[in-house]
Image (cartoon, rainbow, N blue to C red):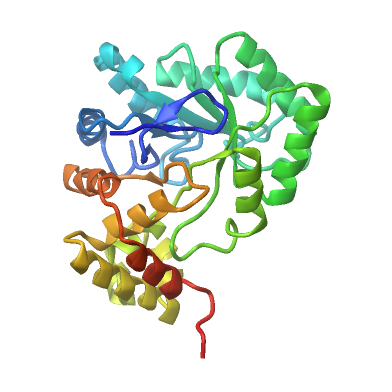
Amino acid sequence: MALRKLGGTGLEIAPLVLGGNVFGWTADEATSFRILDGFVDAGLNAIDTADVYSRWAPGHEGGESETVIGNWLRANPGKRDKVLIFTKVGMDLGEDRKGLSARWITQAVEDSLRRLRTDRIDLYQSHRFDPDTPHEETLGIYAKLIEAGKIRAIGASNFDATQLGDALGVARAKGLPRYETLQPLYNLYDRDSFDGALRDLCIAEGIGVIPYYGLAAGFLTGKYRSEADLANSQRGRSVGKYLNPRGMRIVDALKEVAARNNAQPGEVALAWLIARKGVTAPIASATSLAQLEGLVKATRLTLPAEDIAALDQASAETQAA
């Protein structure tokens, strides 16, 4: 499987990143181990998580996903050098454990390293913009962590074009490490926050892009078509917003393209992202080996130009009269 350069990180990744948000939440540890094993066996190599996963679940406090990945690495010591570990800092973990201050990052990185049972984080990402902390302070502590060998490269998540552009400017002016990657919300339905100025900036600056929600919380698999379909889904609240005429139009187009390419709609949705200019590799998660198989198939699916055009048209915000 051909690897792709991830911005200016010096890292090379397969065309799909495994999302770790489900580990220790909707995928228990045993299931997570099987998925991680299958992921590596398929020739894929990048795993994305965050310190806050899965604080939203009842009884969870955050760190559950990192802990599962760390236990897997401990059980499989030979696999650490076969994978790249991406994690994030900045979301609210309670009390004063949030944001991008030097104080909090200094503690948070040690917490993540301990949970992950590793001596280095390959890509450490600012999970969201922190209006209370200057970019210079955040990039300054990242510089120290890179020098210490605790992190290899840095990225941003959920930054808009102004926030990312300002951070890049500070890095240049102060001689600090810059954000080499961006993790935005981006898929066939959610296009407006990345397409445009932010995408243009990433392409111009050579920023690696690893979008999350590549399957729109599972909506783009085609399994949700009504409110009734959401009843037994833990992601029902997230999926509900897609149940509208535009969403149905996109799913119908996915099914048509899938039929022409002997594939499943979810595989097509990810293949569209993989082929998109400016995207390095989408992030997608799996809670079973069957779902993982679909993710792997997506990395091997090359869509004809006419099918990409059909998906572009179906997902346009407005339709021609």
Q: For the N terminus, which image quadrant?
A: top left
* Residue farthest to the right, as pictured: 173
Q: Is residue 81 above or below residue 199?
A: above
At 33% from the left edge and 66% from the top edge, which residue is drawn? 307
Q: Is residue 30 above or below residue 217?
A: above
Residue at 71% x, 40% y: name it. Answer: 130
> Toward the viewer: 27 or 175?
175
Q: Position of residue 80 (x, y in %)?
A: 34, 16
Frontmost residue, 200 versus 103: 200
Q: Residue furthest bottom?
A: 321
Would residue 64 appear left or right of 178 to someone viewing this image? Answer: left
Q: Residue 19, how many percent across, how many down?
A: 38, 40
Quadrant for residue 127, please give it: top right
Does residue 243 lie above or below 239 as drawn? below
Q: Position of residue 92 (x, y in %)?
A: 60, 39
Q: Residue 194 appears in which quarter of the rendering?
A: bottom right
* Position of 205 relative to 272 (above/below): above
The residue that appears at 62% across and 44% down in the rendered structure is: 202
Residue pictured at 45% horizontal, 53% vertical: 276
Total number of numbered labels? 0
